[in-house]
Amino acid sequence: MLWWMWIVLWVALIAVSLIFLVVVGFRVFRRGMRTIGEFGEALDRLEVNVRPDDGAGAHPAGVPGIPVPAVFSAPGDVRAARELARIRRADDRRSRRIAKRAGRGQPQLLQDMPHL
């Protein structure tokens, strides 16, 4: 092979490598910009969760329906909410048990009778 063929070969290899790097860099840049745009949209959607500065008329636990981490809540509030949830779960279990026994025609338990 002639000496100038080696130069042409290496120039072609470097040119193809540079073109490849430019194309890959452009694709990564476009995907990165798309990801940043989606991140901005997600932040806009999550702005609803931010408490207002003045606190006037705000729900005490943030936005209704969106839970606040227990770490940021008062311990008494967390205890009361946990106790309320525990009582609600027990009542739900009792009502399911009563309905199941009534559906099978079985006698009810005295502890399941709320009026006794």
Image (cartoon, rainbow, N blue to C red):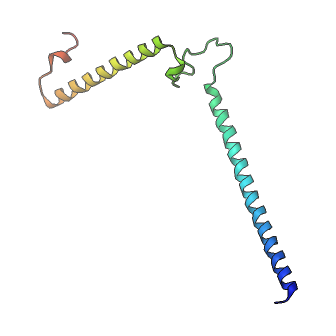
Kindly identify the residue that appears in the image at 74 percent across and 53 percent down: 29
Q: Is residue 11 left or right of residue 65?
A: right
Residue at 42%, 16% (x, y): give it. 81
Above or below residue 37? Residue 92 is above
In front: 97, or 42? 42
* Residue extending farthest right: 4
Q: Quadrant of residue 38?
A: top right
Query: Where, quadrant-wise, is the C terminus in this rendering?
Result: top left
Question: Which quadrant would the N terminus be assigned to in this image?
Answer: bottom right
Q: Is residue 77 above or below residue 64?
A: above
Q: Position of residue 44 (x, y in %)?
A: 67, 33
**The quarter of the displayed image where residue 3 is located:** bottom right
Q: Position of residue 91 (x, y in %)?
A: 29, 20
Q: Is residue 78 above or below residue 105?
A: above
Between 2 and 57, which is closer to the camera in this rendering? Answer: 2
16 with respect to 46 (left or right): right
Q: Residue at x 71, y 55 (%)?
A: 28
- Looking at the image, residue 110 sits to the left or right of residue 72; the answer is left
Q: Residue at x 19, y 15 (%)?
A: 113
In this view of the protein, which residue sits in the foreground, 77 or 100?
Answer: 77
